[in-house]
Amino acid sequence: MIIRSSLIGNSLLLETETVNRIRSELKKKLGLPLKILLDFEAVMKVESFRSKKVGIRIKCEKIHSLFPKYGGARSNSSSSSVSATVSDANCEGFHFHSSETKMVDSANGATDLSSEMEVDAFRRLFPLRFHERHLLESVRPDARPLGKARETSLALGAVASADGSALAKIGSTTMLAAIKMEVMTPANETPDEGCIAIDFHMPPICSPIVRPGRPAEAAPVVSKQLADTIVRHVFFYFFSLYNSGMIDLKELSLVSGKAAWMAYLDIYCLDADGALFDAALLAAVAAFSHLQIPVVSLNDDGRIVVFSKENVGEKLKNKPVNEEKRKLSLRSIQFGLTCIVHKNYILADPTAEEESIMETLITIVLDSSYQLVSLYKPGGPALAYESIIQDCIALSRQRVRELQTILNEAICDMEVD
């Protein structure tokens, strides 16, 4: 720590009575009683962070100081020094900002840092302590209760050129999902199934920690989580085999062994402010709910042709494989909720700041019937109690009801339009 200061003294013209009194005090053994009043402004700078100016006033009383005796010619004051009696001194510090003055207990050294500096400075320098103080009051810095998720909105049909699309927002976290359908030849192992390709993108505009030219570390992790949730076929649950995939890939088949749909799902993170998987999954579910599978037909060569404005003539010559655009029926609609576990507290739907300073994250995925689909915990300290997981699942059930209502309202709004 480096403290730079400058003191400026001004000469005063004293009255004769005051001068006589000072001379009398100088002759006493205790010396001249002094009262020090010092006002200054402090600025804290840590790397690129610079706090606002903070006004501080130091007031000291009951200090007695002797003065050097000069013999003959006036000597240089800088070479003379005397001691002062400070055993009975009483010093107080005041913090003032604008017109307000706040007392600070500086004498005993137990000053509370959060009351001396600006709230923003304290939040940047001591983020964990800042959040823990809110946890003691069971409230978050954004005024949310610990178990409450951020405000969520959903809009279908956000991309006109896509076969299905949606824009999802959870707090400031924003995801844009778009689906494009193409005809492919199915694999020999699965002749009656289509395929889904999922890509999760985090461009530099979404977060300051994402640098141009470098892939974001979270992108492949979220992509893998989405693939496991949407297209996973089987998993073991209490020694039984269950199919947990949200989409039945057989619905994407056109002609067995010859043609099937390939669904390209691209999700773009426009703003990364925590709970990325939750928002990405919500956007994906909404995009598949909005998806309309195009009309296709077999041409004279036995190839699949997608009907469009450019091939209206072929529409009359060939019988469509599917007569009109159809919706994709979802086997189960699934939603996720990420929670942070810190000490004995559980925080639902964390922000990016909360995720960066608290270690243990748990992501719960439930289907629309409130059954557990998956539980994801990327490292962090081991959970001490099973009850913590149960509490996270309980919060997830409540969140599923909220998201199901939001999705249904978005679908109704789309149908009205």
Image (spheres, rainbow, N blue to C red):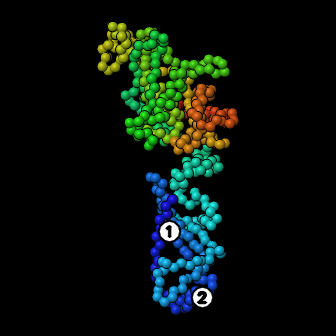
Q: Amino acid at mark 1?
A: Phe
In three-dimensional space, the C-alpha distance between marks 1 and 2, rounded to whole angstroms, equals 33 Å
Residue 178 picture location, percent across and down:
42, 29
Front residue of 248/241: it is: 241
- 178 or 311: which is nearer to us? 178
Which residue corresponds to the image point at 53% horizontal and 52% vertical from the top-left? 125
Q: Residues within 10 Å of mark 2 (few under 14, many from 20)?
A: few
Residue 40, numbered circle: 1
Q: What residue appears at the point 56 percent right and 32 percent down from the top-left corner?
A: 336
Circle 2: residue type: Lys
Q: Secondary structure at mark 1?
A: strand
Q: Around disc 1, counting alpha carbons within 10 Å, would you say few (fewer than 14), some (14 to 19), or many (20 or more)?
A: few
Q: Position of residue 36 (x, y in %)?
A: 55, 75
The answer to which of 240 and 10 lies nearer the viewer is 10
Residue occupying image coordinates x 59% and y 88%: 27
> Which residue position holds label 2?
27
The image quarter containing residue 379 is: top right
Q: Is residue 341 above or below residue 320?
A: below
Left or right: residue 59 versus residue 324 is right
